[in-house]
Amino acid sequence: MGAKRQRIIDQGPSFYGNSPGSSFMYTAPPPPYSYVSQPPPFPVVRLRGLPFDCTETDVAEFFHGLDIVDVLFIHKNSKFTGEAFCVLGYPLQVDFALQKNRQNMGRRYVEVFRSKRQEYYKAIANEVADARGGSPRRNAPRAKSSDEAKESAEHTGILRLRGLPFSAGKDDIMEFFKDFVLSEDAVHIVLNSEGRPSGEAFVEFTNAEDSKAAMSKDRMTLGSRYIELFPSFSEEMEEAISRGR
């Protein structure tokens, strides 16, 4: 399990990170909780009826103004079910998220429900199992074609990562590539036009040999997501980074 999502589980309700460039729907910080024997509720909602081409960026835009810590899409036999969990920055933001119930995302209206920490954790475990088991018969032809393209690509020392959780930071990516010597300056998280993580990143390795060896991590999991790796080059990296500025 990835370091960032693992910290959500280990630290419990004290971990409510802010998303880069996000804006609050209220100006005052959340008030202190007066719970005597129980912690504040875990800030997670469940969505149902999402478009089947839905992305993390779509969910972030749907909940515009709220702090998105994580988006977990639900799959069954490697097929997206149209459901997802969304972890928010603070418990109070759950009430704002529920106001989006039955509002449209594209042509479909999306249902938003309260959820619980246990349901979110169970979904993570199921997603990890599904990613490892998958559906080999369905995915094999596409994976083979993709692998052949990656093997024939020229390595310049730069890899593009796709499928990152919104909550993933540079430290998580460095941990993912812990067998290689990397500095924070070599990790570039791509942001969208609103300054939020797009789910992609670029990593500059010491040399082309290291980036080629790092391809062994292709389709390995960070949290519940399997991460796709692609050989890249400086022009592609600079163009992607500049779009988020």
Image: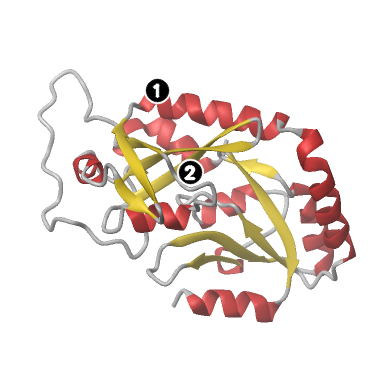
Q: Nearer the viewer, mark 1 or mark 2?
A: 1
Residue 18 seen anywhere in this rendered image of the structure: no
245 vs 126, nearest the viewer = 126
In this rendering, would 72 be left or right of 39? Answer: right
Residue under the point 60% across and 79% down: 238
In this rendering, would 202 be left or right of 140? Answer: left
Residue 116 seen anywhere in this rendered image of the structure: yes
Cα gap from disc 1 to disc 2, whole angstroms: 18 Å
Q: Residue furthest front?
A: 107
Amino acid type, callout 2: Lys
Q: In the picture shown, does residue 201 fall above or below 115?
A: below
Quarter the C terminus occupies: bottom left
Numbered-mark total: 2
Q: Residues within 10 Å of mark 2 (few under 14, many from 20)?
A: many
Where is residue 222 shown, x and y percent of the image?
Answer: 60, 43
Among the 4 quarters of the image, the one containing residue 25: bottom left
Q: Which mark is residue 238?
A: none
Amino acid type, callout 1: Gln
Quarter the N terminus occupies: top right
Q: In the picture shown, does residue 241 fall above or below 202?
A: below
Where is residue 45 shown, x and y percent of the image?
Answer: 33, 36
Q: Which residue position holds label 2?
A: 4
Residue under the point 10% across and 29% down: 34
210 vs 152, nearest the viewer = 152
Q: Which residue position holds label 1?
A: 118
Where is residue 176 shown, x and y percent of the image?
Answer: 64, 48
Where is residue 123 shown, x and y percent of the image?
Answer: 49, 28
Among the 4 quarters of the image, the one containing residue 70: top left
Secondary element under disc 1, as helix, strand or loop, is helix
Secondary element under disc 2, as helix, strand or loop, is helix
Residue under the point 30% across and 58% down: 64
Give the mark nearest the N terminus, 1 or 2: 2
